[in-house]
Image: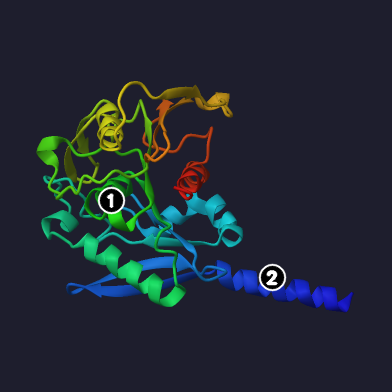
């Protein structure tokens, strides 16, 4: 019995140590760029970047990903929460007036540096690298898929549309990639039908495409045409006034492209699903491809 108690206590100590957040930084072109992560339980972990929205930081977005954190030890996931530059990302929105965009901060160097860091220190599985981004973090996830797709297996962008064609300044590699989009039809910040994105602190991020055009961009890039498969997801929280329709393009030897249309959804997460667990299920479907 004493031996069993000792084993349990030792396990809890190890699990606690693994669950603690680690803070570090990289010097990128004269700026110390910070990030936070949870140590994986084994070598060759799957790396998932969790990207915060405009005006936030990595530790703030961590609360939403708690259920994914709970899965991380058993799935051997290395969760990384990077910080934007002065709380914003330099994504692909040309007219954005945030400091990150005005100073043309090199995000590709930052993410490339983090990948090198985790390859050196934790021997990450370089073929299983993913990103989940919310709002401005969703735009950053799009940028990763647009400009360095060879480094990523798949992305999820939540409450984010691609910049409109007159508001995009990224050099697009136009490489097909599995993409999942989760957008709300009543979102006034990231307009579902497209339009101008303005924040309350006098930050203007320019115009975005509609969700339909964003979905069409990624599905066309993957070689799909015609109509996607449509499903109605279970309404697990009728009181929230939201329902979710899933639209999916999926064929053998082609990247899956999926849209979760949150009818009545605003600039927030729906209650009917956990967006991080849904993203993980999406990522797992891509691993054998």
Give the residue drawn at x 33%, y 30%.
187
Give the residue drawn at x 17%, y 52%.
98
Q: Do the residues labelled 2 and 1 touch (CB within 8 Å)?
A: no
Residue denoted by label 2: 12
Q: In which quarter of the image is residue 260?
A: top left
Quadrant of the snapshot with the N terminus: bottom right
Q: Which of 39 and 231 is in front in this view?
A: 231
* Residue at far front of view: 253
Position above or below: 31 against 192? below
C-alpha distance separating marks 2 and 1:
36 Å
Q: Could you tell me residue 249's position as x and y percent?
A: 39, 31
Q: Quadrant of residue 238?
A: top right
Q: What element carries label 1?
A: helix
Q: Is residue 93 visible?
A: yes
Judge from the rendering whether residue 239 lies leftward or rightward of residue 127; answer left or right.
Answer: right
User: For the residue carrying disc 2, how many other residues have a C-alpha within 10 Å: few (<14), some (14-19), or many (20+)?
Assistant: few
Judge from the rendering whether residue 48 lies leftward or rightward of residue 187; answer left or right.
Answer: right
The disc, 2 or 1, on the residue closer to the chain's N-terminal end is 2
Q: Is mark 2 on a helix, strand or loop?
A: helix
Residue denoted by label 1: 140
Q: Could you tell me residue 136's position as x and y percent?
A: 29, 47
Q: Nearer the viewer, residue 127 or 185?
A: 127
* Residue at far right of view: 1
């Amino acid at each position: 019995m004493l031996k069993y108690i000792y084993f349990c206590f030792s396990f809890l100590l190890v699990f606690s140590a693994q669950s603690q957040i680690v803070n570090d930084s990289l010097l990128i072109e004269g700026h110390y760029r910070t990030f936070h992560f949870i140590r994986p339980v084994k070598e060759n972990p799957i790396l998932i970047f969790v990207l915060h929205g405009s005006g936030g930081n990595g530790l703030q977005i961590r609360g939403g990903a708690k259920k994914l954190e709970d899965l991380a030890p058993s799935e051997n996931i290395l969760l990384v929460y990077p910080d934007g530059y002065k709380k914003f990302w330099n994504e692909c929105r040309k007219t954005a007036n945030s400091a990150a965009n005005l100073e043309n901060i090199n995000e590709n160097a930052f993410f490339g540096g983090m990948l090198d860091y985790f390859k050196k220190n934790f021997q990450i599985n370089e073929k299983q690298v993913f990103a989940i981004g919310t709002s401005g973090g969703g735009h950053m996830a799009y940028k990763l898929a647009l400009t360095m797709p060879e480094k990523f297996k798949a992305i999820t962008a939540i409450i984010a549309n691609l910049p409109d064609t007159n508001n995009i300044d990224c050099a697009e590699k136009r490489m097909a990639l599995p993409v999942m989009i989760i957008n709300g039809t009543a979102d006034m910040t990231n307009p579902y039908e497209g339009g101008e994105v303005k924040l309350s602190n006098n930050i203007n991020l320019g115009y975005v495409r509609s969700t339909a055009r964003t979905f069409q961009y990624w599905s066309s890039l993957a070689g799909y045409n015609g109509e996607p498969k449509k499903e109605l997801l279970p309404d697990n929280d009728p009181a929230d006034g939201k329902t979710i329709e899933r639209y999916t393009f999926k064929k053998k030897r082609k990247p899956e492209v999926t849209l979760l249309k949150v009818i009545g959804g605003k600039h927030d997460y729906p209650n009917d699903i956990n967006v991080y667990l849904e993203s993980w299920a999406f990522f797992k479907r891509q691993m054998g491809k």
